[in-house]
Image (cartoon, rainbow, N blue to C red):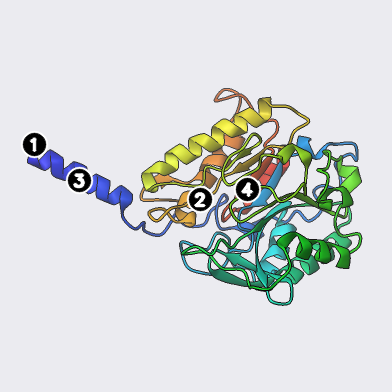
Amino acid sequence: MKRAAAVILALVLTLTATPSAAYAADASYRSLPSAVHPDWMAGIPDATSLAALSIPGTHETLAIRGGAWTQAQENHGESAATLTAQLTAGIRMIDVRARVNTGNSFTIHHGATYQNANFTDVLDRLGGFLTGHPGETVLLRLKQECTGQTGSCTDASGQAAFADILDAYVAQRPGLFWSPSVNRATGAAMPSLGEVRGRVVLVVANGPYGGRLHQYGLAQFADWKDGSSTYVQDEYTVANIGAIATKRDRVRRFLDATTAGDPSKMYVNFASGASVFATPEAVAGGALGVQGVNPFLLTYLTEGPEVHAPVTRTGVLMLDFPGGGLISEIIAVN
């Protein structure tokens, strides 16, 4: 009995201890540059609803600094050069977290860690990409990052409100944003791809605790908050390495719900997760013999009908450390 108890204790400690490095790069994980899809939307008919598309995205798009518990993406350069690399690979929804800084400006943070990029860098990169690839669109989730709590950042004092600063950025870049999505008074209807080619679509703007800021973005996301909501799966707490299996199942169930769901609605499925005992790279790539979410997704998307009902629409899949093969497979569902 004592030996059995010792084995059980050792297993518990293994699943809750600081994880070892995640699995090596492969087609699903940490191989972003192996995908090159800068114009994949160009061949899709104009009349296609954005809600009908299968779109690869990144969670904490510019989180390249701060160590294993803060970094969520491969580092392909500062000043938002990492964003350009993602867009070239085929990423079309991004997740940007902003701190209110002096001069009524936004700097990009993940928690307390400044990511060596400013919102001006983000808009420069988006504008440059869309000018060169006018058949594409980029979806944006923007979040006010700072709560002032331990582990978070604190907004600079004496500045304008977050929404007022956002409006100023939009006004400085006429034609960059799809206008109905950046109207704080009225949520936008779901557009067709033809309506938004060459533009950035603000999908939602969230406050520091996750609530929606004004009516920015698409009207269907009125209840998008911190975590999951009607059309969003974002169960981001993965308690330990063993709990990655639960996260995989949540992603799978929401993927199935997307295929079967309302074709006029956009579904956003976060494959990301973390906790003190499970880093973002461990959840994405796997660790300690537990399969990560990314390799699971690549397998699930490529399995035939003899295994499960085919995925005919992924919606938006928000990924940490995506591999080129996974990006390509999501795009191929279209």
Q: CA distance from mark 4 to mark 3?
A: 35 Å
Q: Are marks 2 and 1 in contact (CB under 8 Å)?
A: no
Q: Which residue is mark 3?
A: 9
Residue 225 appears in the figure: yes
285 displayed left or right of 121: left
Q: CA distance from mark 2 to mark 4?
A: 11 Å
Q: Which residue is mark 1?
A: 1
How far across and down, in percent of the image, does residue 25 sit?
52, 57
Residue 91 appears in the figure: no
Q: Amino acid at mark 4?
A: Met
Q: CA distance from mark 1 to mark 4?
A: 45 Å
Q: Which residue is mark 4?
A: 318
Label 1 residue SS: loop
The crowd level at tag 2 (other Cα within 10 Å; few <14, some 14-19, many 20+) is many
Tell me the residue at 87%/60% (across/down): 176
| Mark toward the viewer: 2 or 4 | 4
Residue farthest toward the bottom in the current orientation of the protein: 103
Q: Amino acid at mark 3?
A: Leu
How far across and down, in percent of the image, does residue 113 sit?
54, 69
The crowd level at tag 3 (other Cα within 10 Å; few <14, some 14-19, many 20+) is few
Q: CA distance from mark 2 to mark 3?
A: 26 Å
Q: Which residue is mark 2?
A: 284
Residue farthest toward the left in the current orientation of the protein: 2
Q: Amino acid at mark 2?
A: Ala
